[in-house]
Image: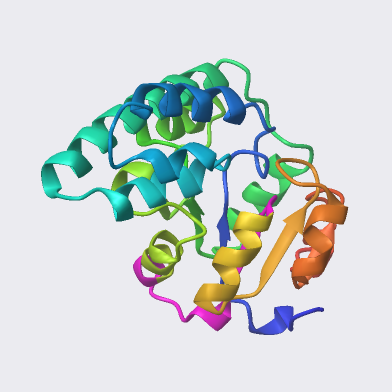
Amino acid sequence: MTSDMNSISGVIFDLEGTIVDFQWKIPKAVSQVKKEIRKWDWASPLLGITDYAQLYNEGIRLAPNAVEEKRFLNLIDAVYDEYDKDALTRWRPQSGAQELLETLKSREIPIALCSNVGRKAMDGILLLLGWNQIFDVTLSRDEVKFLKPDPEGLKRTIHLLGLEPSKVLFIGDSRTDIRTAKKVGCPVAVAAQGENTRKEMEPLQPDHLLASLHPLMEILKLK
């Protein structure tokens, strides 16, 4: 499946696995949260979940009242912030990310970041890599209620860019990114260099399934 890149007016990136390498210790983070909630009487349906975003979203949906929802969010945000901080110590730019971002910026193409990573780690890595002036919009876990693949964050990011979904290319590295883009109605390109393999993502039929970010220079007609 391919999309017409001539109609693209803006680009939104995922962060980890997409423009920086994948370092987040998902199984450990999920295990730590489940260990803490094991004795909560309403939380038993969450104990079989292995996906960190699903755990986050379903915990909010299952919480029986506002007090329990806040209790859950205080816990899971603290744990995820801890693993964000750990990943931050090891993140490195993905091959091709610097050239792609700088070229988009020089062409004055609106670019944004929409990630399930928290604000502290997001701002930290952008500052460390000198990318803190690159993006027109950045949206982290801390600015949404539900994480991707819920469409909330991507919809808001597109709105903040002032563009229509069909005019924005979302670039990611996972099945989650593909599902999110399809819910929103924007084309999606994924590079099999992060959370999911090519084999895992292929059945979801992204518009572009790549091995790295490098082909995007030609796909977006930047060369």
Q: Is the residue 191 above or below the residue 35 in the image?
A: below
Residue appearing at x 40%, y 36% in the figure: 118
Residue at 73 percent across and 57 percent down: it is 190
Name the one closer to the observer, 114 or 148.
148
Q: Position of residue 127 (x, y in %)?
A: 46, 28
Residue at the location (65% across, 26% down)?
23
Q: Position of residue 53 (x, y in %)?
A: 49, 46
Q: Position of residue 195 (x, y in %)?
A: 70, 41
* 6 lies above or below 169: below
Q: Is 175 included in the stretch rendered in magenta? A: no
On screen, 67 above or below 172? above
Find residue 34 and report its image quarter.
top left
Q: Nearer the viewer, residue 112 or 132?
A: 112
Task: Name the side, left or right, on which 83 lies relative to 73.
Answer: right
Name the residue rendered at 60%, 28% in the picture: 27
Left or right of 62? Residue 177 is: right
Residue 186 appears at what percent x and percent y? 58, 76
40 over 157 or under it: above or below: above
Q: Is residue 69 left or right of residue 194?
A: left
Question: In the rendered structure, which segment of residues is drawn in magenta?
Answer: 159-174
Q: In front here: 157 or 153?
A: 153
The N terminus sits in image quarter: bottom right
Display coloring? rainbow
Total labels drawn: 0
Q: Quadrant of the C terminus?
A: bottom right
- Residue situated in front as seen by the camera: 82 or 17: 82
Residue 4 appears in view: yes
